[in-house]
Image: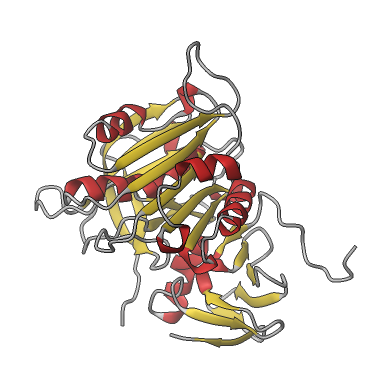
Amino acid sequence: MAGITWQLATVAQVREETPRVRTFTLALPDWGGHLPGQHVDIRLTAEDGYQAQRSYSIASEPRSDPARAAQIELGVERVRDGEVSPFLHDVLEAGDRIEVRGPIGGYFVWDGTALEPVLLVAGGSGIVPLMAMIRHRSAIGARVPVTLVYSSRTRDDVIYYDELERLAGNSDGLRVIHTLTRAQPPGWAGFDRRIDRHMLETALDGDARSTQAFVCGPTPLVESVAEALVGLGFPPSQVRTERFGPSGG
Amino acid sequence: MTTTDAPEIDDLTLDANAVGGLLMELFGTDMTAAASQCAHCGNRGPVATLLAYVHAPGTVLRCSICTEVVMRIMRTADGRYLVDARGAAFFRV
């Protein structure tokens, strides 16, 4: 039986991605690998025994290299008034230990073996599990066409911007389409509005009926994007969704 | 207006991906990809597509189509779980 137990991970590194998002690299004593899209639970226990627990998506690709196989990277957005993420951002540093369990999830996952083109749609920190898929695709040299439509508030809020530019620049079938909904830098050539049906139509390369979509972000974005994709001909079963929310704080 | 107590779908609504760890603890295996059927409206789909309300005391999973309660999970004072799954016609585990 595949149970799930808590283990004490050690923080190996903390890296700032954007003003509100940090990457925490965790070293795990017992890690059998993960699939892109999966997450872990993190549990904090106060001195009085009060516990708070949240789920955080794994941003790193599965690794076979023994030196890094038991390390995962989590992308964590600092949620204002959150119970867990402010602690992670403000207190946690390299060398600290933290309770973790996982990997978790078998629905919102992509292992890179399917041949269908993939449409990834992210809002804000919803990019994190999709980044694991993009990194995995690159790591295994997959050539399946993948298009990412990624909505952020401003240019400074775009997580993994440079890495996405670099990976898209390889011209190996990864396309990245940004939209900045709140403010755009001078000369911005990308979209400047919320993701809508027309934008998704532009992003869709082939036949919706043979494309797999993964949508991750705040609930309103996920709801509207999923509805638009079904309107564009996606079978509902090929639109996999994961909602992030303030309760993820 | 509806006459049920179904909450609005807003940005506090998550989905059952978020409680995948809890479900794994209860069922001993991943449940997010498991098929389920709503006992109220008959909608079938992976457990991950159920809406999750994690702010109530305990966890409430609702059907994404009819929004009726499919499962309630409460943690009892002695650290065990009380699972009310009368809203589910089945889970394929």
- Between A195 and A14, the residue placed more toward the observer is A195
Residue A35 visible in this rendered orientation of the protein:
yes
Residue at image location 31% in from the left, 83% down from the top? A1
Residue A92 visible in this rendered orientation of the protein:
no
The single residue placed furthest to the top in the displayed view is A186
Lateral position of residue A25 relative to residue A242, left or right: left
Residue at image location 62% in from the left, 56% down from the top? A227
The picture quadrant where one finds residue B62 is: bottom right
Q: Position of residue B82 (x, y in %)?
A: 59, 80
The picture quadrant where one finds residue B73 is: bottom right
Residue A97 in the image: above or below residue B15? above
Residue A163 in the image: above or below residue A131? above
The picture quadrant where one finds residue A88 is: top left
Q: Position of residue A50 (x, y in %)?
A: 54, 55
Lateral position of residue A203 relative to residue A175, left or right: right
Residue B73 in the image: above or below residue A22? below
Residue B55 in the image: above or below residue A159? below
Q: Position of residue A66 (x, y in %)?
A: 9, 53
Residue at image location 52% in from the left, 66% down from the top? A235
- Between A161 and A175, the residue placed more toward the observer is A175
From the image, which quarter does the C terminus of chain A lie in? top right
- Between A98 and A177, the residue placed more toward the observer is A177
Residue at image location 57% in from the left, 26% down from the top? A192
Lateral position of residue A104 relative to residue B62, left or right: left
